[in-house]
Amino acid sequence: MTYNTGYDIGYGIGHWVAFLFIGMVIGWLAGIIIRGRGFGIIADILIGIVGSMLGGWMARMVGLTTNSAIVAYLFALIGAVVLVGLTRFVKRLDV
């Protein structure tokens, strides 16, 4: 069943496994791009997964849509880099 939200409720387990794997890779890349003392690779990956979703959501909100997987990964990477950088900045302020 599909609604106008852009999400298909009927995604299978394979879709979610691929989504998590790609999110993990993008989170790892974001951790490499944003250098410095961070939270570690596991936290960077988890923050990267959330950042990937954030990047895709933000792209849709400003009207950027694509049918290209490469551009979608780029949106996800931008969101992950922003979120990893933001969390590291907040952590630095906390010290």
Image: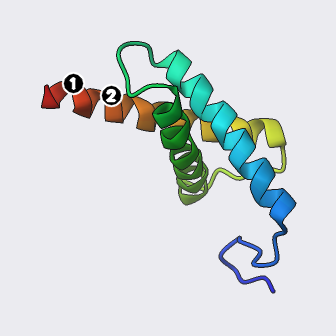
Q: Nearer the viewer, residue 34 or 66?
A: 34
The C terminus, quarter of image: top left
Amino acid type, label 2: Arg
Disc 1 crowd rating (10 Å Cα; few below 14, some 14-19, many 20+) is few
Residue furthest out toward the top: 36
- Residue 66 vertical position relative to residue 39 in the rendered view, above or below: below
Residue 18: assigned label: none
The N terminus, quarter of image: bottom right
- Residue 18 vertical position relative to residue 42 in the rendered view, above or below: below
Mark 2 and mark 1 in contact? Answer it, CB < 8 Å.
Answer: yes
- Residue 78 vertical position relative to residue 3 in the rendered view, above or below: above
Disc 2 crowd rating (10 Å Cα; few below 14, some 14-19, many 20+) is many
Residue in the image at 33% along x and 35% along y: 87
Residue in the image at 78% along x and 53% along y: 17
Cα gap from disc 2 to disc 1, whole angstroms = 6 Å
Residue at the disc numbered 2:
88
Q: Secondary structure at mark 2?
A: helix
Residue 48 at x, y percent in the picture: 54, 38
Number of marks drawn:
2
- Residue 79 vertical position relative to residue 1 in the rendered view, above or below: above
Q: Nearer the viewer, residue 67 or 83?
A: 83
Amino acid type, label 1: Arg
**Can residue 79 be seen in this snapshot?**
no
Residue 67 at x, y percent in the picture: 83, 50
Quick check: 10 left or right of 95?
Answer: right
Q: Nearer the viewer, residue 95 or 10?
A: 95
Residue at the disc numbered 1:
92
Quick check: 60 left or right of 89?
Answer: right
Residue in the image at 54% along x and 59% along y: 61
